[in-house]
Image (cartoon, helix red, strand yellow):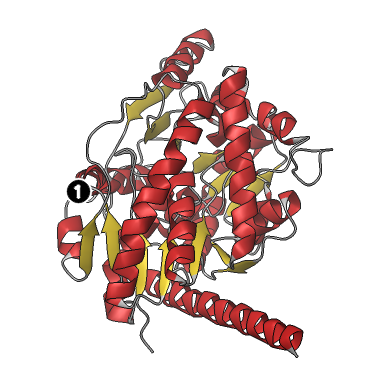
Amino acid sequence: MNVTPLIIVKARHTAISGGYRRLYEVLKRGKHEGINFIILTDLVSYQNFIQMFPDFKNVLEQYKSYFVGPNKIKSISSKSPRILKSLTSYGDFFVSAVSISKIVREENAELIVSPSEGTPSVWTSYLSGEMSRTPWTALFQGETPLFQPTSGLGCINPLNVLRHVSRKEFTRKVPLLSRVGFSIELLGLLKIAEKSLMLSVSRSLSEEISALNPRVMFHVITPGNGVDFEKFNAKLSPNVVYDAIFFSRLIPEKGMFDLLKTWKIVTKKFPRAKLAVAGIIEDFKFVEKFLEMISHYNLGKNVVYLGPQDQNSIIRLIKASKLTIYPSIFDAFPLVILESLACGTPVITYNISTVRHNFINCKAVLRCPIKDVSSVAKNVISILENENLRGQLSKEAREFASNFDWKKVVNAEKEAYFKVIERFQQTKMKGLNSSHTFLL
């Protein structure tokens, strides 16, 4: 059975995150699996996707596509407080929703989809659904640490939301008005998420958000993420150049600073150990601090900073490394781990909930207590010392990753769309029955 969803495609930058990669792979295969997407985007997002994925234009040619929204830069300064940006944006969401609701009716779209939990896409999807009386949903992929529960606070409400936001690492140095803006956004997202069945790529993420607001209902897409196994498992036969690799967005939540603390310990055992670091730069201040720490720890000869790399280069780097270190404290379904496993490269990571949920049965993923850099270093040293162990873990890694095919992901997402539509129809029928009972 086919389904016709309208999907809102937005890209605020050209750094290839796991969420953008997933969206691209789903759109690339959706038509063949019976998902007749109607693409809704804007010129800036379109150009950004083309820069990230050069064949994105060919992908869009499979579907009907619409460009909606202003193409010029807003007059509000990027340095304006978050609260000003938030309040100004809601008017834009409404204007976009008016146009989108017309397209939904004209194209007979069965569903409106926000492929991320970003405020613009979620609010626009919600308002479009309300205006067109069409089912809508948002796919939560763990893009913001704001959804991580704060110990001791419980459910989020107007009285404690600012404390919740203020305890997040990325907000500690931002002005109070900006933290208020983040608080307003979070409260709004948690409230409108109650209005429909939400989707998630990982059970751990849905549980975390339910801890913030138990009234938000989720359907977990399984498998939530995939890998082009043939591409990553191809026999490139590169020379092993690095003892370990780290590749991810270069932000504190991904463990970039814990990484160096770990590697300092490793080099005491292996003075010539080489660590490759590749990643998406979101804020140069983090990179500057990272480079300063390399100098402070005297790791200039042990850490090779490579900066952003395309996917083919990442594959070669993973295969040229004995293991992957990924000390992330925030994730939904880490492609870093899955892609490493597909290359036959074991992974050492923190024992966060998403790792427990998604990789618990994989011996090639070694889990360490969160923020315990000594434990990470101990596992790194064990693998580097034991070539036979590396061989066993490499085999286990490939076997595990082979189960995460993108075709399975697309079909699971298609089934999830039908769940949202079914839930919408059931809710609608309950409303009609209640009205009928009242009249009687």
- Foreground of the two, 149 or 245: 149
Please state the horizontal and vertical placement of residue 181, each as a whole percent of the image: 57, 30
Please count the marks in the image: 1
Q: Name the secondary structure under disc 1.
A: helix
Residue at coordinates 69% horizontally, 52% vertically from top-left?
208
Q: Is residue 234 visible?
A: no
Residue at far right of view: 152
Residue of label 1:
50
- Between 262 and 14, the one lying in front of the other is 14
Q: Is residue 142 above or below residue 408?
A: above
Query: Residue 186 location, x and y as percent?
Result: 61, 42
Disc 1 marks a residue whose amino acid type is Ile
Local crowd size for mark 1, using a 10 Å CA cut-off: few (<14), some (14–19), many (≥20): some
Between residues 413 and 153, which one lies in front from this camera angle?
Answer: 153
Residue under the point 19% across and 48% down: 50
The residue shown at (20%, 44%) is 47
Q: In the image, residue 204 lies at what x, y percent?
A: 66, 57
Q: Position of residue 245 (x, y in %)?
A: 44, 37
Foreground residue among 25 and 168: 168
**Rendering quarter of residue 360:** bottom right
Q: Is residue 79 left or right of residue 167?
A: left
Q: Quadrant of the C terminus?
A: bottom right
Question: Quarter holding the N terminus?
Answer: bottom left
Q: Is residue 209 visible?
A: yes
Q: Residue furthest top?
A: 296
**Residue positioned 43% across, 51% down in the render:** 121
